[in-house]
């Protein structure tokens, strides 16, 4: 004789797998090795935290305004930041006009931040970019609307670093994608040119390209024609980064199953339609982590332009301690710009993770 099934009331999951305890077990103590690494990390943090608090907060006289006050108390010299922050951030830009590079940097950061928000991915954003870049150029150069003209040889600091990185990433990315497609092309001449370019550029350090763009490039130009030093450095950064982006994208293209290409062929799509609508979106999605790492490297590599005499953020930090009164505080100056670099690089890294998470939602179980 059959009996009717009885319903069992739902019970909450074990407390050891939920809440704070569950999170700790899953992320920090999921295995003996992870538990050991967690304990070691906490031990190092406990050793470092008191020293950091002592150096940055307890030892220094936060009200000190001179180098003598910093030397007397020890610790981090906050007086250097208060006294030299405008030189570090804006370089040799005229003191009374430094509101212009500040506004230009804010515009660049604002348009980049807006481009990272999906709900702003509208047609108006494509129009906002040319307007934003035009506004940056007008603010930095001046010469119109009553603004004093400032040569780009006087640009420096954070705005210059942002300009080099923004144009470097924005122009190197499409160039690198074309190189990746060219390297996988069935046309021998196109493939050979792309392979030679990629291997040649990746085989030399960025410093050598900067020297060549600064010293040798003018030798190949027609007589009476010259390219500005800042533009030469920008071209070198674009060419160098594009070669690395090409290899990253090529790896993404190779990761796409052959069935995707065959499916695109069966739909009667042309080569460029296949790349635009089927292949490249998947390849770029796979390549996001490595692409962002390349962008972060470019942002940090902008500091190398100092070797050809461009007054970037690194050179501005060095110039801040050339004053005899502030000599001996180089570490304090470099810590200040290290925090700036960290904020921008960490922001790019976190955005990469959020973008990966969003794009993978449809595949998560």
Image (cartoon, grey):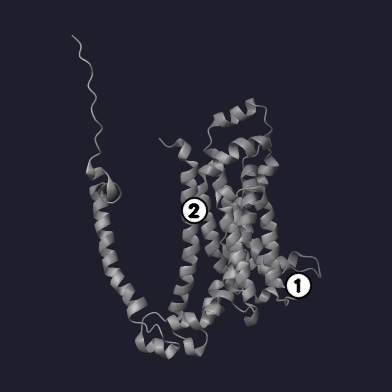
Residue drawn at the location 46% of the way across and 45% of the way down: 357
Position of the N terminus by quadrant: top left
First in sequence: mark 1 vs mark 2 = 1
- All told, the count of numbered labels is 2
Q: Along the horizontal axis of the image, is 78 left or right of 210? A: left
Q: List x then y, in percent, for residue 108.
A: 61, 63
Residue drawn at the location 28% of the way across and 60% of the way down: 41
Above or below for 265 versus 29: above
Q: Along the horizontal axis of the image, is 55 left or right of 167? A: left
Q: Quadrant of residue 46?
A: bottom left
Whole-number angstrom distance, CA of label 1 to CA of label 2: 37 Å
Residue drawn at the location 57% of the way across and 44% of the way down: 250
Nearer to me, 144 or 81 = 144
Q: Looking at the image, do the residues carrying marks 1 and 2 touch, with CB atoms under 8 Å apart?
A: no
For label 1, the SS is loop
Crowding around mark 1 (Cα neighbors within 10 Å: few <14, some 14 to 19, many 20+) is few
For label 2, the SS is helix
Q: Which residue is mark 2?
A: 351
Q: Which residue is mark 1?
A: 145
Q: Along the horizontal axis of the image, is 24 left or right of 315? A: left
Position of the C terminus by quadrant: top left
In the current view of this chain or complex, which residue is farthest to the left?
1
Q: List x then y, in percent, for residue 118.
A: 56, 48
Residue drawn at the location 62% of the way across and 79% of the way down: 92
Crowding around mark 2 (Cα neighbors within 10 Å: few <14, some 14 to 19, many 20+) is some
Above or below for 229 versus 261: below
In the current view of this chain or complex, which residue is farthest to the top?
1
Nearer to me, 347 or 270 = 347
Q: Quadrant of residue 280?
A: top right
Q: Is residue 203 in view?
A: no
Q: Is residue 350 in view?
A: yes
């Amino acid at each position: 004789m059959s009996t009717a099934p009885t319903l069992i009331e739902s019970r909450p999951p074990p407390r050891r797998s939920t809440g704070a305890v569950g999170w700790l077990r899953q992320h920090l103590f999921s295995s003996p090795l992870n538990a050991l690494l967690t304990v070691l990390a906490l031990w190092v943090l406990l050793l470092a935290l008191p020293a950091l608090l002592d150096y940055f907060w307890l030892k220094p006289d936060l009200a000190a305004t001179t180098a003598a006050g910093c030397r007397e108390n020890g610790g981090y010299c906050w007086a250097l930041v208060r006294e030299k922050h405008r030189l570090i951030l804006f370089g040799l830009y005229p003191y009374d006009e430094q509101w212009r590079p500040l506004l230009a940097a804010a515009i660049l950061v604002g348009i980049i931040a807006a481009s990272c928000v999906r709900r702003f991915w509208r047609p108006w954003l494509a129009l906002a970019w040319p307007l934003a870049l035009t506004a940056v150029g007008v603010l930095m150069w001046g010469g119109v609307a009553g603004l004093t003209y400032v040569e780009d040889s006087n640009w420096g600091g954070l705005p210059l670093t942002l300009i080099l990185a923004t144009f470097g990433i924005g122009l190197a990315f499409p160039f690198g994608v074309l190189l990746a497609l060219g390297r996988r092309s069935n046309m021998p001449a196109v493939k050979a040119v792309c392979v030679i370019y990629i291997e040649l550029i990746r085989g030399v350090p960025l410093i050598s390209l900067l020297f060549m763009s600064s010293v040798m490039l003018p030798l190949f130009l027609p007589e009476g024609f010259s390219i500005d030093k800042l533009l030469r450095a920008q071209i070198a950064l674009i060419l160098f980064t594009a070669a690395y982006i090409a290899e990253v994208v090529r790896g993404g293209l190779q990761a796409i199953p052959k069935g995707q290409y065959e499916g695109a062929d069966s739909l009667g799509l042309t080569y460029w339609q296949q790349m635009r609508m089927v292949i490249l979106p998947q390849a770029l999605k796979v390549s996001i982590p490595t692409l962002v790492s390349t962008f972060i490297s470019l942002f940090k590599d902008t500091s190398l332009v100092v070797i050809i005499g461009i007054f970037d953020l690194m050179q501005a930090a060095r110039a801040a301690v050339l004053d005899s009164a502030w000599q001996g505080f180089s570490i304090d100056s470099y810590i200040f710009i290290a925090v700036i670099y960290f904020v921008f690089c960490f922001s790019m890294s976190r955005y990469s993770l959020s973008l990966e998470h969003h794009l993978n939602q449809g595949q998560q179980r």
